[in-house]
Image: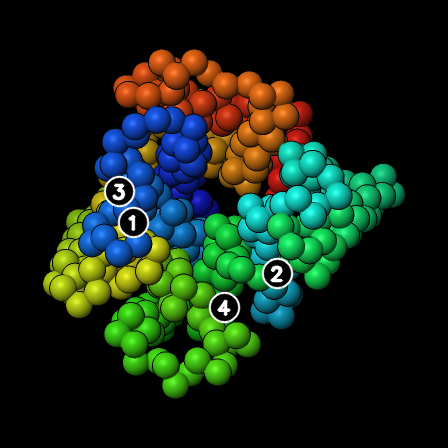
């Protein structure tokens, strides 16, 4: 009998979380090699930073069939599962909205930006910590305090021009918001199609086609409704998640000890990668513009990585290598948010490493060790039952 959850998914997520914190810390360095950073919007190409986020979206899709089937086995109805999907999506969108506006915090704010940011993350922890007894009165009080914090922070917010709730806006949804939209789309497809592989493939083709049409400028006639209803990232984000969903369905369908599993995933990888490079002349590879070629090639890279990790962890049973970074796969949201507190604190204290430690190979090693330190600290919090769960 197949295990209820692939070890490879948590291992893959932990590794990508390590890389995400690493590339997010590159802004602290000088003279960073171009291949590590984001490629400019109108340049045809991608660096490591352009691959990490789509890999995470792919992992979001990987997790969907396991998570939804787990809730089905527990007796949840389709409506109950859908409400759960809506709840998780709302949480991600709300956090994404606040974090994006934090980037634009300005002189009109009634608190120093760093104080506002720290209070914001504290509010997130109060609301979405995985409490042992969610129904306890003390827990309800903490959640209510967190919501009150968010409300107060909204009125204390300010950008360069105005303050209060009117200053906050949907500029873009941020990383967490884009994950939310991708998760919502992929989860709804899987839920309402009852996980049928053919429909997952049709959904992937649809989202890729929508992305292609948008990149070619064929959807201009829909511009009047774009502000009200639109597919996140012109279909790119859901497409990345659907690639993960299809992979998970194949994982559940075939025994990983059989050649059919590896042949099927290998063909899927080949098709996605080949289509990415074949279509490249039409729109180029661009993360900023979320072009179909970027989606397809990154999906191919994610598939290769997942196959390799599956072979190592699930087939060869080699799991000790990821023990140190495991909290990055089990307390991912906690891991992602902790650097916001750290950056705010060091900014308040005007702390900065010497230039010699922030450039070249030494600087890269520093950012890698920083990412590892965040994950280790996340593990320490996890042992004290402090972790976010939505």
What's the CA distance linking mark 3 and mark 1? 10 Å
Residue wearing tag 2:
169
Q: Position of residue 387 (x, y in %)?
A: 62, 35
Q: Nearer the viewer, residue 239 or 341?
A: 341
What's the CA distance linking mark 2 and mark 4? 27 Å
Is tag 2's residue or tag 4's residue first in the polypeptide sequence? Answer: 2
Q: Quadrant of residue 89?
A: bottom right
Of the two numbered discs 3 and 1 in the rendering, the one whose residue sits closer to the viewer: 1
Tell me, yes or no, whether the two marked residues, 3 and 4, touch with CB atoms within 8 Å.
no
Residue wearing tag 4:
188
Q: Position of residue 236 (x, y in %)?
A: 36, 63
Is tag 3's residue or tag 1's residue first in the polypeptide sequence? Answer: 1
Give the crowd class for mark 2: few <14, some 14-19, many >=20 residues within 10 Å: few
Residue displayed at 38% across by 31% down = 26
Left or right: where 23 falls relative to 82 = left
Q: Nearer the viewer, residue 139 or 43?
A: 43
The disc label shown at residue 47, or none: 3
Q: Is 56 placed above or below 186 here?
A: above
Residue displayed at 16% across by 61% down = 280
Q: Quadrant of residue 383?
A: top right
């Amino acid at each position: 009998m197949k295990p209820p959850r692939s070890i490879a998914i948590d291992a893959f997520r932990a590794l990508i979380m390590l890389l995400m914190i690493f590339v997010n810390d590159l802004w602290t360095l000088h003279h960073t090699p171009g291949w590590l950073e984001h490629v400019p919007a109108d340049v045809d190409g991608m660096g490591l930073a352009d691959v990490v986020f789509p890999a995470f979206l792919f992992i979001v899709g990987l997790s969907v069939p396991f998570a939804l089937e787990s809730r089905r086995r527990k007796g949840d109805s389709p409506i109950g599962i859908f409400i759960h999907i809506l709840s998780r999506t709302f949480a991600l969108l709300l956090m994404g909205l606040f974090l994006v506006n934090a980037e634009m915090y300005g002189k009109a704010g009634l608190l120093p930006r760093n104080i506002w940011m720290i209070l914001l993350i504290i509010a997130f922890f109060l609301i979405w910590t995985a409490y042992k007894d969610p129904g306890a009165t003390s827990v309800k009080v903490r959640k209510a305090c967190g919501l009150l914090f968010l409300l107060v922070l909204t009125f204390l917010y300010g950008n360069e021009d105005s303050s209060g709730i009117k200053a906050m806006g949907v500029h873009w949804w941020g990383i967490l918001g884009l994950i939310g939209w991708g998760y919502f789309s992929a989860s709804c497809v899987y839920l309402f199609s009852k996980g049928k592989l053919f429909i997952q493939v049709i959904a992937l083709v649809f989202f890729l086609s929508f992305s292609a049409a948008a990149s070619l400028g064929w959807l201009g006639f829909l511009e009047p409704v774009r502000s009200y209803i639109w597919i996140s990232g012109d279909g790119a984000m859901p497409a990345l998640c659907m690639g993960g969903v299809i992979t998970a369905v194949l994982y559940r369908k075939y025994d990983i000890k059989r050649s059919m599993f590896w042949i099927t995933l290998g063909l899927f990888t080949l098709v996605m990668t080949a289509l990415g490079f074949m279509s490249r002349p039409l729109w180029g590879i661009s993360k900023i513009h979320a072009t179909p070629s970027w989606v397809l090639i990154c999906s191919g890279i994610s598939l290769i990585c997942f196959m390799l990790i599956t072979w190592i962890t699930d087939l060869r049973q080699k799991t000790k290598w990821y023990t140190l970074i495991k909290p990055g796969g089990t307390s991912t949201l906690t891991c992602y948010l902790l650097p916001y507190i750290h950056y705010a604190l060091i900014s308040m204290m005007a702390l900065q490493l010497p230039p010699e430690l922030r450039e070249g190979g030494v600087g890269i090693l520093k950012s890698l060790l920083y990412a590892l330190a965040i994950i280790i600290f996340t593990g320490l919090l996890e042992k004290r039952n402090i972790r976010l769960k939505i």
